[in-house]
Image (cartoon, rainbow, N blue to C red):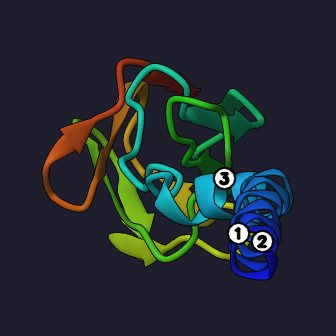
Amino acid sequence: MDKKLTSLLILLVLIFSLFIGYIVFQKPIATFTKAKEESIPSSTNSLIFAWPLSAKIDKKEKIQINVFIRNANNTPLPNKLVSLKTNLGTITPSSSVTDKNGKATFVFESSVQGIAEITAVIDNQIQLSKTISVKFE
């Protein structure tokens, strides 16, 4: 009878331990097994801004362009290479790496009148769906 009671107690302790282990470690195990947050840039959630949207060429005004790279969850993505392309004027630098907030900053100027169309490309692969237009007078 003592052997039966001992083995029954061991079995009960083992089952209880497994149950407690499952309850306690269920969430941490789930977080370990989840995929990491995506680091793939979203062409639709990423943003491009310029200020001002018009400039005088005789005053050699410069325009600041900011590009914010985001993923599908709108989370900023650092260390992404952003390149800008335009049909008019000069962008300095031609490419920049995003900071911890997913922001890359550029300076844009032109000595020719017209409307410049600016597009951004991330990591030489993904083109932003949004573009901006800047007018030089």
| Residue identified by numbered label 3 | 76
> Dot 1: what SS?
helix
Q: Is residue 56 left or right of residue 107?
A: right
Can I make out residue 61 in this image? Answer: no
| Residue identified by numbered label 2 | 1
> Dot 3: what SS?
loop
In the image shown, does 128 or 33 lie closer to the viewer? 33
Circle 2: residue type: Met
Residue 12 location in percent, x, y?
A: 79, 60
- The quadrant holding residue 124 is bottom left
In the image shown, does 42 or 87 lie closer to the viewer? 42
Q: Residues within 10 Å of mark 1 (few under 14, many from 20)?
A: few
Mark 1 vs 3, N-terminal side: 1
Q: Residues within 10 Å of mark 2 (few under 14, many from 20)?
A: few
> Dot 2: what SS?
loop
Residue at image location 42% in from the left, 31% down from the top: 113
Residue 6 location in percent, x, y?
A: 78, 79
Real-space CA distance between mark 2 and mark 1, rounded to the nearest whole angstrom: 5 Å
Circle 1: residue type: Lys
Establish if 58 lies above or below 72.
Answer: below
